[in-house]
């Protein structure tokens, strides 16, 4: 399922969303963090978490949280419900799921 969303994921990686609840990361800052090796590119994170997605990716946010960075990935599941994955942007490890 993630492979079909890969072009969307690349676009989302370049246009990082903002949110009022966390410290949002600008697209330029995100590219800089990836270039310096501080976070993984979104495409790599998606590959590592393909089995965890369980649906179609509809939104991705990169935020500064917990002294580091996390990707929040919103997913539309086959049953029509929404879910969210919280992934450590440095390691690609799944931190939580809703």
Image (tube, rainbow, N blue to C red):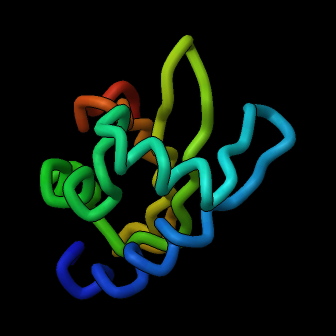
State which quadrant residue 8 falls in.
Answer: bottom left
Q: In this view, does 19 lie to the left or right of 44?
A: right
The quadrant of the picture occupied by the N terminus is bottom left
Given residues 18 and 85, the one toward you in this image is 18
Residue name at image x 68 percent, y 60 percent:
17
Q: Is residue 82 left or right of residue 19?
A: left
State which quadrant residue 97 falls in.
Answer: top left
Given residues 18 and 34, the one toward you in this image is 34
State which quadrant residue 96 falls in.
Answer: top left
Image coordinates for residue 81, horizontal then vertical, percent: 51, 64
Residue name at image x 56 percent, y 14 percent:
66
Q: In this view, does 76 lie to the left or right of 67?
A: left
Residue name at image x 61 percent, y 71 percent:
15
Image coordinates for residue 9, horizontal then vertical, percent: 39, 74
Q: Can residue 98 be seen in this view?
A: no
Image coordinates for residue 36, horizontal then vertical, percent: 35, 40
Residue name at image x 26 percent, y 61 percent:
54
| 66 in relation to 79, above or below | above
Residue situated furthest right in the rendering? 20
């Amino acid at each position: 399922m993630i492979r079909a969303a890969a072009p969307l994921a690349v676009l989302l990686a370049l246009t990082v969303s903002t949110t009022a609840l966390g410290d949002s990361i600008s697209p330029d800052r995100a590219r800089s963090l990836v270039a310096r090796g501080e976070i993984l590119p979104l495409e790599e994170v998606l590959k590592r978490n393909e089995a965890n997605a369980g649906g179609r990716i509809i939104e991705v946010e990169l935020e500064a949280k917990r002294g580091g960075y996390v990707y929040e990935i919103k997913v539309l599941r086959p049953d029509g419900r929404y879910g969210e994955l919280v992934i450590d942007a440095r390691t690609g490890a799944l931190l939580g799921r809703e």
